[in-house]
Amino acid sequence: MPDSLKIRFMKLPLARKLLLIGGFLTALSVFMPWYNDVDKFNIGETFLGISGPLYLAGFLVFIAGAVSVALVAIELLEKKTPKLPLKENQIHIAGSSLSLFMLILTSSAYFHPKFGVNLADKNVAFGMILALIGTGLVMLGGILVHKKREVSFDTEGSIAPLIDMERGKANLSLKKDITVGEAMDRHKQEQYGAKSSGWGPVQESINNLPKHDE
């Protein structure tokens, strides 16, 4: 792994690391033993996740883990994310839920009394345990990504100034050449608002009339 790729991985948020590691473990687990079909005479076979009568469950688990790895790897390699039918966190949660369902289904079939009647002892193998761990990490990472989106502070905003300086300058420029009466009328209008709004424009119109020298 190039140094730049290592640095990018270290800079990933915890949720993204969980998704990448969990998805990798989930996908890898299907190539390891999931359960044994060996009787008391030591005759039988050990099945991988993608082999045996429940191979389809292992295949779906592999697809779910590979999708999670691919989505994080695209970000890690700084590639453009393709258009997705669902939000990314929803894909991770749905994929991990599907994997968990397939693992439970496989375990229920394996531990059923009519499966492997001659088996002396039924135990899940290391691959099944690894798949459960990887699925749990992916689900946890998807939940953390979902919570981060809900409380995200990345939205840009603006804070309006408490004092409008331009408006203040305009008011000062208008108040340069006014009489004391006009100043009092303006003060009353600003103080009482709507109560003096009817008289304010009339007063301004009267004050703006051309003055003739007597």
Image (spheres, rainbow, N blue to C red):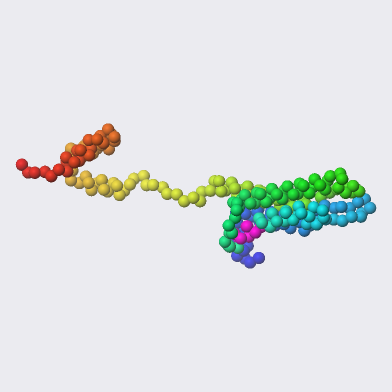
- Magenta span main SS: helix
Magenta-drawn stretch contains 74: yes
Quadrant for the N terminus in the image: bottom right
Q: Position of residue 188 (x, y in %)?
A: 24, 35
> Can residue 64 be seen in this snapshot?
yes
Residue shown at 63% from the left, 51% from the top? 91
Residue shown at 17% from the left, 43% from the top? 208
Q: Which residues are magenta?
A: 69-76
Residue shown at 89% from the left, 55% from the top? 44
Magenta-drawn stretch contains 208: no
Q: Choose between 108 and 69: the one closer to the eye.
A: 108
Residue shown at 24% from the left, 35% from the top? 198
Q: Position of residue 85 (x, y in %)?
A: 60, 53
| Quarter residue 16 falls in | bottom right
Left or right: 161 as drawn, with respect to 58: left
Q: Choose between 43 and 3: the one closer to the eye.
A: 43
Q: Which residue sits furthest left?
A: 214
Quadrant for the C terminus in the image: top left
Left or right: 30 as drawn, with respect to 189: right
Count of marks overlaid on the render: 0
> Can residue 191 be seen in this snapshot?
no
